[in-house]
Amino acid sequence: MTADNSLASVALASVALPGGRSELREFPLTPSHADDGWLRVEASGICGTDVALHGAGLSRPTVLGHHVHGVVVQLGDDAARRWGVQPGDQVVIEEYLPCGDCARCRAGDYRLCPRTDLWGEGRRVGLVPVEEKPSLWGGNAQYMYLPREAVVHPLPADLGDTLAAWALPLANALDWVLGAGALRPGETVMVLGPGYHGLAAVAAARYGGAGAVLVSGLPQDRPRLDIAASLGATVTGSASSGLREHLAEATNGRMADVVLDLTGAGSDSVTRAVSLLAQGGRLVLAGGKGSTAAKLDTSELTRLNATIRGVRGRAPEWVRRSIELLDGGGTGLDQVPTVDVPLAGVGQMLHRLAAGEGPSTPHVVVRPWAAHSTT
């Protein structure tokens, strides 16, 4: 076994409880085996899924956190060969815990493995309850368990911590803008929602050669819209009213070739998003819209020769591309303000975000080694 003796004997974690509560707990750490390992968590980004899971009330105590990067501190020889890493390496962990045997996994499309489906078994980082040993299956902890099925990507040794925290959200945005959105150079991109992924989408669109990137939000999103503007986007209108008119004016009536609905709003947002499409436009939907069906004018879709794509997560090649872009610099994401949250403040922050009272920046990151005081 290859091992690094820096693995502690216990780890502190923020555990999400049924009823929308959280508490700090301490868990014992056991040595790794030949085919698994341990990660010292440096950062665990909070996204809308974490907020929704915490607010809905989990059925069993669980360590949340699925946008995780850190340093490998211990792993077995088989795991080292499989992942191509050694103790001391900085890595990013995808949230999927795929079976490895189904047709999707064999084709390399493990994000669609039935085992990882949030609407099915949902076996993912940040979703396995603490009753399943060794309990630390999520990133909101000082150490996280790396099971055999973990998806591990090495990070450049000199990639700063601030940029490393953007590896997965930027990978998502690249997949959604360049993959599902099929952006071509010179086209117009409309981003609905200046959140965590909305800002990453601005960087992805600029990388893809978009002729213009426009971002909309609600009046209370002004600080986030200002951040989007600093990344090179044009802020236009409101996500709730007058947006079509603003976009038409900004594009001389052509409208948007790619529209990304990242709002997390209800099904009405889909209807509104269709009205923003140009001829041949592509609408990309990320995140659930609730159980209410969206009303779509199929004649309008036909007239526009439009495409609607639902997305979740990202394909592995976009993670690699994201890491390369972040390492090369120029995305601007290192300039996005970050709010760091200690483990003791995770529950409070999740409640704030659920109530729409979160920080002015959407980039909120759990830092397990920060001082254990609330913010």
Image: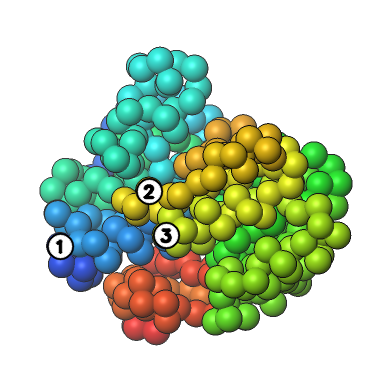
Could you tell whether 234 is left or right of 288 in the image? right
Q: CA distance from mark 1 to mark 3?
A: 25 Å
Please indicate, yes or no, whether residue 11 appears anywhere in the rendered image. no
In the rendering, at what x and y percent does residue 239 appear? Answer: 58, 68
Q: Nearer the viewer, mark 2 or mark 3?
A: 2
Three-letter code for the amino acid on which mark 3 is drawn: Gly
- Residue at image point 20% right, 62% down: 57
Q: Which mark is residue 266?
A: 3
Q: Which mark is residue 259?
A: none
- Residue at image point 34% right, 35% down: 116
Could you tell whether 67 is left or right of 325 in the image? left
In terms of secondary structure, where does tag 3 sit? loop
Check disc 2 and report the residue beneath it: 293
Three-letter code for the amino acid on which mark 1 is drawn: Pro
Q: CA distance from mark 2 to mark 3?
A: 9 Å
In the rendering, at what x and y percent does residue 201 appear? Answer: 65, 54
- Residue at image point 17% right, 43% down: 133
User: Which quadrant holds residue 369?
Assistant: bottom left
Of 111 and 26, the residue lying toward us = 111
User: Which quadrant holds residue 148?
Assistant: top left
- Residue at image point 81% right, 65% down: 250
In terms of secondary structure, where does tag 2 sit? loop
Three-letter code for the amino acid on which mark 2 is drawn: Ala
